[in-house]
Amino acid sequence: MKITPDVEALLGYIRPHKARLLQAALAMTVLAAMRAAVAYLIGPVIQTVFIDRNTEMLRLIMIGLPAVFVIKAAADYATSYLINYVGQKTVQRMRDDLFTRVHQLSMEFHWRKRSSDVMSRVINDLGNVQSAVQSVPLYLIRDLFTVVALVGVLFYLNWRFAAVSLFILPTAAWMLKVLSRKMRRSSSKAQATMGDISHKFQESLQGMTVVKAFNYEEQAISRFRRSNDDFFSETMRFLRASAISSPLMELLGNIMLVGMIFLGGREIMADRMTPGDFFSFIAAFFTAYMPLKNIAGLNTRVQLGLASWDRVRQVLDERPDVPAPASPARLGDVRGTVEFRGVTYKYPSRDTVVLRDLSFSVKEGEVAAFVGPSGSGKTTIIQLLLRFFDPLSGAVLIDGKDLRELDPAELRAATGLVTQDTILFDNDVTGNLTIGRPGATEAEIREAAEAADAHPFITAMPQGYATQLGERGVKLSGGQRQRLAIARAIIKKPKILLLDEATSNLDTASEQAVQASIERILKGRTVLMVAHRLSTVRNADKIFVLDKGALAESGSHEELMSRGGVYKKLWEAQS
Ligand SMILES: Nc1ncnc2c1ncn2[C@@H]1O[C@H](COP(=O)(O)OP(=O)(O)OP(=O)(O)O)[C@@H](O)[C@H]1O
Ligand SMILES: [Mg+2]
């Protein structure tokens, strides 16, 4: 096999386990020898004990045969253990690297790749890689050695008989291969429809509220039935092939046995072979069957493994398209001025520009608000400021420094974000609140929770701050989740706080309370907020009104009201 960079990278994962592979090779060699020995010994046992009635030999066999079996079992155990260790260890590191890589990649990667696609690489493809990594040494050393040793036994016993039989074996292996190819094709189709079925189940389970509210049950059920029917027919096709295959194989084996009895009987009658040798011959012949079958299927497994490895490598080889500079400029003590200088942006998957030559600046300690219709680019501005992606042209600056010159980790240490939908992790309340500052003290956590008006409902839960959240944890209301998100951002004490509709799920009274405490705790820090409810932004130092990615107006509430433009119309519509 030619070693491409592809295979070279795969070998890089396996190489650290060279010592264990060598031990496994040794165990496999012993195992192969023992398998051949067991097959060979059957003849002498039958001959000396049962036919010649040799008592001395019986005693010897009572000691020798168990010893052979014990060595064989030990070698078998060592082989499986070591090979599985290497296989598991190899994909463990790949899984680790995949998880790490996914965290290093830019947002662009996550827009481009569906999460289910990445998941299938982590689960299915790594499984194929593991199977290939384990099969190659197993089939090439254990099984090949076994076959060679057994063929040696066959020829040693009776070379003419052996030569004839060796025509039969490959024929059987070939027939089996044709059958299994057919089975594999229908099995992979069945697997694909099974994926479809589990997706539909998940979709309905997650969206049950909407399914019920829209009377969508019947449509969902009939769509499900179609996939379910497909799965049935694909599986039946597979089962038909496999139902025919095992009786067919048995029949084939029996016919071979009859043929061998005929040929062997003639050899025995011609005194060219003892009955004992004949039994050894049969044993060796049929012992060679499984290893031969494995070797015949090796190429398919390797091809499958390499194709899967390729899909795994695609993710491992992805590079962030928002690279960190080699020698980043330091932010140092962040003041918190923000400037957009002629920023134009377009999402890679779309043709339309979402921000067009946008310029604005926010001074240290100011509260700036962004308002505008849905889809006008407010969230995009927030994400550009976190450098989730770079502008097509123009620049985003913090303290006069272009974000592209900064270390993204330092930038994100200086910023705090509350997103439109709150993401909670499988962790307790405290763990969820302190993801931005793991060392926060109990007092700091409590202060932030109180400021976000989250403390009362947290303490009302039976386990308080130790209550488990996330998918498997307690369910919270939209407003409660949002309060946790705000507390999470406050604990971080960021120099620049980014609030993307952070209080949209709170009632007006608690919205005002929360806003007041944010301002108290984060006094002197820069706040950029997005809000649809204009009453929320009324007190902001500057209000930027966006329309289709461009600045329509800006100024304080009073200035904008007296101007009588878009903002005034919006305000009047809302009050
Ligand atoms: N990941 C993405 N890929 C492609 N297009 C996107 C992506 N995210 C947003 N857009 C598009 O960019 C435009 C601006 O989106 P953005 O989320 O910035 O709007 P917004 O002002 O925050 O809206 P809303 O008030 O509804 O939150 C929209 O037309 C949206 O469809
Ligand atoms: Mg938005």
Image (cartoon, rainbow, N blue to C red):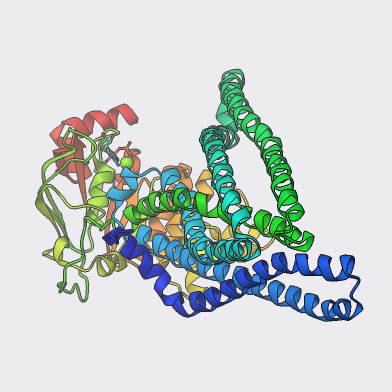
Residue 502, percent across and down? Answer: 39, 49
Q: Residue at x 62, y 66 (%)?
A: 156
Residue 540 in sight in this render: no
Residue 472, percent across and down? Answer: 61, 53
Q: Residue at x 75, y 55 (%)?
A: 268
Residue 128, percent across and down? Answer: 48, 53
Q: Residue at x 27, y 51 (%)?
A: 383
- Quadrant of image for the C terminus: top left
Judging depth in this view, the residue of 31 and 265 nearest the camera is 265
Residue 351, percent across and down? Answer: 18, 33
From this view, report whether residue 392 is shown above or below residue 81. Answer: above
Q: Quadrant of ligand 2?
A: top left
Judging depth in this view, the residue of 556 and 263 nearest the camera is 263
Side of 78 relative to 397 (left or right): right
Q: Residue at x 57, y 41 (%)?
A: 176
From this view, report whether residue 140 is shown above or below residue 238. Answer: below
Name the image quarter holding residue 514.
bottom left
Name the image quarter holding residue 388.
bottom left
Side of 512 relative to 457 (left or right): left
From this view, report whether residue 382 is shown above or below residue 353. Answer: below
Judging depth in this view, the residue of 67 and 45 nearest the camera is 45
Across the whole image, how many numbered discs are drawn on residues?
0
Residue 128 in sight in this render: yes
As drawn, the residue found furthest toward the front would be 270
- Quadrant of image for the N terminus: bottom left
Judging depth in this view, the residue of 434 and 135 nearest the camera is 135
